[in-house]
Amino acid sequence: MASRLNNLLLTPEDWEAVRLTLAVAARAVGFGLPLAVLVAWVLTRYRFPGRPIVNALVHLPLVLPPVVTGWLLLIIFGIRGPIGSLLYDWFGVRLVFTTAGASLACAVMTFPVMVRAVRLSLESADPGLDQAAQTLGAARFDRLINVTLPLASPGILVGAIVAYATSLGEFGAVITFAANIPGQTQTLPLAIFTALQVPGGEAKAAELALVSVGLALIGLLLSEWANKRLNTVLGR
């Protein structure tokens, strides 16, 4: 009985996978969110040649198989890739098969989610407020900081939370670009995959899956609450 109970308890290696999952998701959102806000603002406020192509590229990770996205990251950011080689030669930075690489993979996969959430928030805002601020002499940067970003705050917060929750379950891009290295890139989905490869590992995989489901549910419920709360504050 005690032996069976021990098999159902999380081991230090399992807790490390949980910790690494939370850390990778946080870094992915921290890296991707500022760029997502900028891209959403540009796509919402400006019309320029090639805008449909930029919009399509931004949303490409939503329709590509995650393994393909991971392979493209490997081609671009690998040590022999056009960007990866420069980072390695100039700064000694290697992204492939590292924790930072896992965060990059999650950031790319969740980038369209963040951009979409911010765009929806910006498109639902009253454009007259920005025009009124411009009439009163506010510069473009001042309007961005004092008008646009507060109006987009529900989308920014919800996008960040949903992207974080989505990063917790990212598998294909992470294992392709960052591999499955315990303590470095083995997040919860990869730990579940590893458990399923071991005879009799179904119980451990189910336990880790329950943890993953619980974290995802918390993230989704939090995003719903935050969206309602901010819309109430903004009077929407």
Image: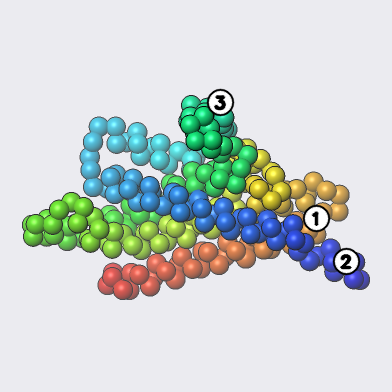
Q: Residue at x 42, y 57 (%)?
A: 159
3 or 1: tag closer to the N-terminus = 3
Other-residue count near label 1 (Cα within 10 Å), few / some / many at <14 / 14–19 / ≥20: some
Specify the color scheme.
Answer: rainbow
Q: CA distance from mark 2 to mark 1?
A: 13 Å
Residue 78 falls in which quadrant of the image? top right
Name above or below for residue 41 compared with residue 81. Answer: below
Query: For the C terminus, which image quadrant?
Result: bottom left
- Horizontal relation, residue 184 to residue 157: left or right: right
Question: In this rendering, does residue 25 appear at all?
Answer: yes
Residue 204: x and y in percent read 78, 58
Q: Residue at x 54, y 35 (%)?
A: 92
3 or 2: tag closer to the N-terminus = 2
Residue holding disc 3: 80
Q: Residue at x 45, y 49 (%)?
A: 31
Residue 202, disc: 1
Name above or below for residue 80 compared with residue 106. Answer: above
Who is closer to the viewer here, 67 or 107? 107
Name the mark nearer the viewer: 3 or 2.
3
Question: Which three-letter amino acid code belongs to the residue tagged 3?
Answer: Arg
Name the mark nearer the viewer: 2 or 1.
2
Residue holding disc 2: 4
